[in-house]
Image (spheres, rainbow, N blue to C red):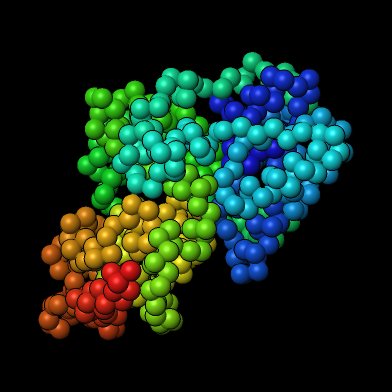
Amino acid sequence: MWFRRDLRLADNAALHHCLKNARRVYAAFVFDRVILDPLLAEGLTTDRRVEFIHRSLHELDAALRARGGALIVRHGAAADEIVRLAEELRVDAVFANHDYEPYATARDARVAAALAAAGRRLHTFKDQVIFERDELLTGAGRPFSVFTPYRNAWLKALTPFHLRSYEVAKYLGALASPPAAAIPPLRALGFAPGDLDQLKVPVGASGGRLLFDDFRARIDGYRDARDYPAVRGPSYLSVHLRFGTVSIRELARFAHERMAASPGAATWLSELVWREFYQQILHHHPRVVGASFRPEYDRIRWDEAPELFAAWCEGRTGYPLVDAAMAQINRTGYMHNRPRMVTASFLAKDLGIDWRRGEHYFARRLIDFDLAANNGGWQWAASSGCDAQPYFRIFNPVAQSEKFDPEGKFIRRYLPQLAGLSAKEIHAPWLLSRQRQREAGCLIGTDYPPPVVDHAAARARTLARYAVVRQR
């Protein structure tokens, strides 16, 4: 059993089929150098994602050992290590769950070919989504490119079969104990321990269970609370969905059972469907990795503006909601969904900087980074994606701040230098008199930067920049 984005025992499709159909089962995970080495080359010697995986693997290994098995962990190119391990253990087959990212599909094709050449098989199964690949198509037999029809088709096609759990516990007697080997420490992989303990990020299947149990009690209020970054509204399960320490079937089943009586559950289920919508976009249109879903948007000429990009990355734009959100991602590896939309819109449509640069920055900072969701969200904000906001819709960062952080609690949490300002003043502190700035202990230009751009002027420049799309 080759674990990848499914770091749990319970309700694991590939593990179920592997245990049920084999006399003896070994469990393995590979820290893939094809993925990790580029991070090290960029100087990221601490990475919260790697640490989250590493700590989750320790929990998974303990769970396997309690049932007579253990986890074999290798460090190398995954395509080579799995084939080599299959030869060492003299297994007949390798079982794994589907991974839909372009690199992963190419890697798995290579593994399947190498195993087949040695008389072995690679068996893969659907586990991280409810519907995959070509399971949902339009009436014309084409992939969906608009969310609402996709969601309607998703809900119409859903049956109890799609939400049932895969039994694992009763088959665990097939687990084999491999030769004794410890999980390599983080430093052996090239990474130093990070700050997950300090940030109190729950890891592993137990962490996913803890967060899900907490959210179950709050889900009825999700629709109203989810847009306010100072409120405990989201599920905070995104990193656990990313690495499979929770089962998408269990989450969707719970939401679906409650949706008729709970607007919050219905809204959350819709968000889970958005996740699958972007997965099928990536599967059918892998060109979106690096290119606009709508090709005409690649004619837009973006500004280089290194100083503005640095100000955005470092949270020095002078717009408090944007800067607080960037402080959140830089300090914690997480950003609330509403600020994600605002900061992405600000980069592309206020600063005129290519959305791909922001996408890459988020990819390196987010602990819950998911290629399909990150790409889809950024293209939505830049208007270049499928079912994206119109190019002329440009978030006003002050209006967004006043609406979704009305008391300034989120801003104060991450920008304490603005704590002396009132709820009315904190959203646009540069408008205050010099005297009031002194009274509040926050001089613009000294304690907090002035706005790097004027929003009204930037909006006019964006509409002109996007003219190449109108002239299609």
Residue 196 in sight:
yes
Query: Percent x, y for residue 471?
Result: 30, 72
Q: Is residue 444 left or right of residue 173?
A: left
In the image, residue 122 sits, relative to residue 101, either above or below, namely above
Residue that appears at 63% across and 42% down = 4
Instruction: Give me the residue at 59% from left, 28% from top.
Output: 13
Does residue 269 appear anywhere in the picture? Answer: no
Task: Say which quarter of the image contains residue 297.
Answer: bottom left
Above-or-below relation of 290 to 85: below
User: What residue is shown at x 60% (from left), y 46% (from top)?
Assistant: 53
How many numbered callouts? 0
Q: Name the quadrant containing residue 3.
A: top right
From this viewpoint, which residue is outermost toward the front? 140
Along the line of sight, which residue is nearer the eye, 147 or 61?
147
Toward the top, the furthest residue is 170
Horizontal side of residue 378 vs 430, given as left or right? right
Image x and y of residue 77, in percent: 74, 53
Residue 444 position, x and y percent, is 24, 81
Say which quadrant the C terminus sits in: bottom left
State the residue in front, 62 or 134.
134
Q: Position of residue 463 (x, y in %)?
A: 25, 73
Q: Say which residue appears at 34% left-offset and 44% top-offset.
A: 147
- 325 to the left or right of 77: left
Tell me which corner region of the image, top left, top right, bottom left or bottom right, holds residue 153. Answer: top left
Q: Quadrant of the N terminus?
A: top right
Q: Nearer the viewer, residue 378 or 338?
A: 378
